[in-house]
Image (spheres, rainbow, N blue to C red):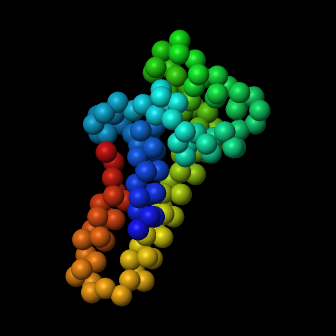
Amino acid sequence: MISIGLAFQLQDDLLDTYADSDEFGKPVGGDILEGKKTFLLTNALARADEPACRSLLELLSDRTIVPAEKIARVRAIYDRLGIRELTEKAVAAYFADANLALDALEVAPDRLKPLRELTAELQGRRK
């Protein structure tokens, strides 16, 4: 069930960048401020042209920028590169893989029910 874990992690990274902080229950943008090498960042760097890549790396290393501004500027680069949509598609694909793996198990349906419920709950996660 690696796919469930990967879907959860990518969804967590996505929520950390794009969620409503009130609904999410914590401030967003922590991964950006920490310069974490998330799926979003690595794919942005892979998709960006040289100027955008340089701008993104400079933003992440600059400790003088006000946090809210840094988050907004990095998110703007992600938006231009289609990173949110790319991540949402990857999350959906991992959840689909997880459901296919569950379908392939030769286990009584009632024994799979908790895993199916967990997968469905995680899929709809907003916080």
Residue at horizontal 38 percent and vertical 77 percent from the top: 102
In the image, is 91 to the left or to the right of 126? right
Residue 19 screen position, x and y as percent: 39, 39
Q: In which quarter of the image is residue 113?
A: bottom left
Q: Is residue 41 visible?
A: yes
Q: Is residue 66 above or below residue 112?
A: above
Say which quadrant the N terminus sits in. bottom left
Say which quadrant the C terminus sits in. top left
Residue 91 screen position, x and y as percent: 48, 57
Residue 112 screen position, x and y as percent: 28, 77
Q: In which quarter of the image is residue 3?
A: bottom left
Q: Is residue 30 above or below residue 41?
A: above
The total of numbered circles placed on residues is 0
Residue at horizontal 47 percent and vertical 28 percent from the top: 34
In the image, is 9 to the left or to the right of 45? left
Residue at horizontal 70 percent and vertical 43 percent from the top: 47
> Relative to the observer, which residue lies in front, 95 or 76?
95
> Relative to the observer, which residue lies in front, 8 or 80?
8
In the image, is 118 to the left or to the right of 40? left
Residue 110 screen position, x and y as percent: 22, 82
Q: Can residue 79 be seen in this view?
A: no
In the image, farthest residue toward the top: 64
Residue at horizontal 77 percent and vertical 32 percent from the top: 50
Q: In this view, does 44 lie above or below 112?
A: above
